[in-house]
Amino acid sequence: MIAPTVVILAAGQGTRMRSGTPKVLHDLCGRPMIAWPIAAALAAGARKVVVVDGPQRVLEGHLPDGVILAVQPVANGTGGAVQAAAEHLDAGPVLVLNGDVPLVTAEALDELLRAHGASGAQACLATMELDDPTGYGRIVRAADGSIARVVETKVAGDATEDELAIREVNAGVYAFDGAALRDALATLAPDNAQGELYLPSALAPLERVVAHPLADPELLLGVNDRVELAHVRALAQARIHARHMRAGVTIVDPASTLIDAGVRIGADTVVEPSSFLRGTTEIGEGCTIGPLTTIIDTRIGDDVTVPHSYLTQCEVRAGATIGPFAYLRPGTLLRERAKAGTFVEITNSDIGEGSKVPHLSYLGDADVGPGTNIGAANVTANYDGVDKHRTTIGARVHTSVDTTFVAPVSVGDDAYTAANSAITEDVPPGALAIARPRQTNIEGYAKRKRATRSPAAPS
């Protein structure tokens, strides 16, 4: 079977979205809406994908490498949109679909293409039967079961009462013989109530047009407003969940869990309720994620636990433990079996193998060696108001509570810091750094303080 050229129509204004963002660039489970039909087309073996945009070229820079952008200079209907892509069509098969049908699958496109090839017809339309076909073009069948015509119903006068009663509708996905399509496009005329060039009108001069009924109408649900976007998002999310669960991932409460399309999760990982896995996140095997955890564009190794925490653009290696209530910011690396504990914030730092930052600490721009224990309420003072500086803490270091490291500063291997110290100078290996005033006890202070108080006022 010859690989098809796929034309995706995406020049519509999407005014019902009431948004400054073009409709097909609205996010759907971590991808812009237009990326979904493009991905389906590529997975179906398309040798060429052409996306038709409007004259503002709002999709420029938002399409994958290799996808061709064609421009429809005037908003004159679906036929005009395909005319804008005509120079990229050849004699091979051509699939045409809309950019706002993100649930279409590669399998559905492949089935349509095969049905077209087996029929010997010049065009094959995906159709579906709907209980409420309002707004869809109706399929009028010929006596032999082929398609006689498609009747548009956008405005009053386009269709008769009998035609409006038809439940079989045009699903908006077409397979054409490329040469026949190019010839038919030249015959289009705006002879309808809206004065547009309708793509279904290109079927009229073709010798034979057949239907390919879809068993699942959800595949071609369109998105015209934010209500429909939310509905389609729920269906797409359910697909994503099902794919992961069938691959060995436990999602305890799918209804409260969001997982983007590009996320990867290893087998035997458990995703607890109210967890959000976004972007290009990769999670290994045997992990426990959540509950109440957000992970964005982060790589996590095997056997990691992350309850009640927020991670973005960082890396966590095998056996590490995080949280609860930890915040790992961009550039953070937790090496094997490291720990970032309760109310810990780490950014742009490398935490060594087996090292622990157990609680109530902030480490920014820090390098911590293996086997080190960071005491509670430790802080790296990494910013001087103009520049950021790094703190280096060696291997097997033990820092006491309430230690502040004023960067740039380094602490050697096997060193210690005393509680409530502000470390402003380098600490040699094996040393104990004490950086605080000596304690002074003032005897009799409480008695003298009471004597200076004014006598109580009479009641």
Image: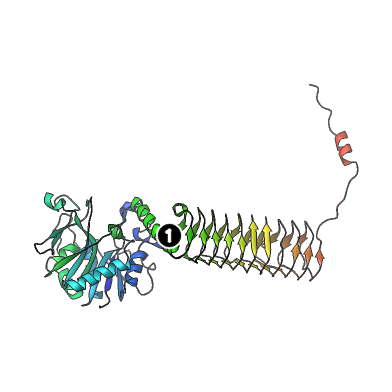
Furthest residue toward left: 143
Which image quarter: residue 196? bottom left
Q: Residue at x 90, y 41 (%)?
A: 444
Q: Nearer the viewer, residue 191 or 324?
A: 324
Q: In this view, does 93 lie above or below 142?
A: below
354 left or right, relative to 303: right
Query: Where's the C terminus, which quadrant?
Result: top right
Q: Mark 1 points at which residue?
A: 241
Which image quarter: residue 408? bottom right
Q: Which residue is drawn at 86% across and 52% down?
A: 439
Q: In this view, does 65 lie above or below 221?
A: below
Observer able to see residue 57 = no
Q: In this view, does 348 lie above or below 376?
A: below
Q: Nearer the viewer, residue 436 or 101?
A: 101
Observer able to see residue 81 = yes
Query: Where's the N terminus, which quadrant?
Result: bottom left
Looking at the rendered structure, the kind of residue marked 1 is His
Q: Where is residue 445 in the image (x, y as percent from the top left)?
A: 88, 41
